[in-house]
Image: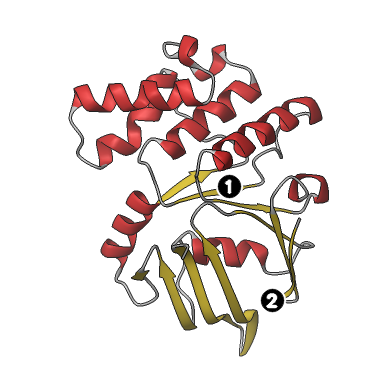
């Protein structure tokens, strides 16, 4: 039986706005097993970004249950939530978020520094992650010396280096041209085939179609869940 990495049960997120309440997510049930490659898609305002923030432990649900890799995270305090976020999730963002005057290797090492990993192991694991994304020959290059696609590969290597339970990608091709975006999606496919659990949040149907499973969100609810 497959191990569940994400288990959401009756998840709800509401916000106080003025004198009223806005329900951003309501009654969300979702399970993602180890090795799944899932795209969450929907129009602007559908709730997919709120769902990503909850899955990424960047926010807490108002009600319901969330288990991440077997850990009930819904009620954790801020410090414990930050620890889980750093050890269990590798983030890939639309804008890369690399440090400008820092080499690719040093950028990839950053999560390991926060985790207290020694220098020798940090460098070895960072080199291994850069090799996995096809940048073994770019370890000493700074972001300004890399193309947009190469910068996103560094960001993906950084997400991989902690060997997380989940890779969470927010519009990973949004800042790239269509050709380079297709290369990044092919890389994510290879990482999925290697056994990584990947969840992408996107408004782009073409990007979502590359995933093995597409979860549609509309008006704060899951309205479809299809495997291809």
Q: Residue at the bottom extreme?
A: 19
Residue 170 percent across, percent down from the top left: 61, 49
Is label 1 in a helix, a strand or a loop?
strand
**Looking at the image, which residue is at 79% across and 26% down?**
179
Residue 216 percent across, percent down from the top left: 74, 66
Q: Nearer the viewer, residue 129 or 192?
A: 192
Choose the circle earlier in sequence order: 1 or 2: 1
For residue 210, above or below residue 122: below
Q: Quadrant of residue 210?
A: top right
Residue 226 percent across, percent down from the top left: 74, 64
Q: Nearer the viewer, residue 163 or 176?
A: 163
> Which residue is denoted by mark 1 in the rendering?
169
Q: Residue at the front extreme?
A: 1
Instruction: Tell me if 87 is positioned left or right of 7 in this view.
Output: left
Residue 90 percent across, percent down from the top left: 45, 45
Is label 2 in a helix, a strand or a loop?
loop
- Of the 4 image quadrants, the one containing the C terminus is bottom right
Instruction: Tell me if 35 is positioned left or right of 124 in this view.
Output: right
Q: Residues within 10 Å of mark 1 (few under 14, many from 20)?
A: many
> Which residue is denoted by mark 2 in the rendering?
220
């Amino acid at each position: 039986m497959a191990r569940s990495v994400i288990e959401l049960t009756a998840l709800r997120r509401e916000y106080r706005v003025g004198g009223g309440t806005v329900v951003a997510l309501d009654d969300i049930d979702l399970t993602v097993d180890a090795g799944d490659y899932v795209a969450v898609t929907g129009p602007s305002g559908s709730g997919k970004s709120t769902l990503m923030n909850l899955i990424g432990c960047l926010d807490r649900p108002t009600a319901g249950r969330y288990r991440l890799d077997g850990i009930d995270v819904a009620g954790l305090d801020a410090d414990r939530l930050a620890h889980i976020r750093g050890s269990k999730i590798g983030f890939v963002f639309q804008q890369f978020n690399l440090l400008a005057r820092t080499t690719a290797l040093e950028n990839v090492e950053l999560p390991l520094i926060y985790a207290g990993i020694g220098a020798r192991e940090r460098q070895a694991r960072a080199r291994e992650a850069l090799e996995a994304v096809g940048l073994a020959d770019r370890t000493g290059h700074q972001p300004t010396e890399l193309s947009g696609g190469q910068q996103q590969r560094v960001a993906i290597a950084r997400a991989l280096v902690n060997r997380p339970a989940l890779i969470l990608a927010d519009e990973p091709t949004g800042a790239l041209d269509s050709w380079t975006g297709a290369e990044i999606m092919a890389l994510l496919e290879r990482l999925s085939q290697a056994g990584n659990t990947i969840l992408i949040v996107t408004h782009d149907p073409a990007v979502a179609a590359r995933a093995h499973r597409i979860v549609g969100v509309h008006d704060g609810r899951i309205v479809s869940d299809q495997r291809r």
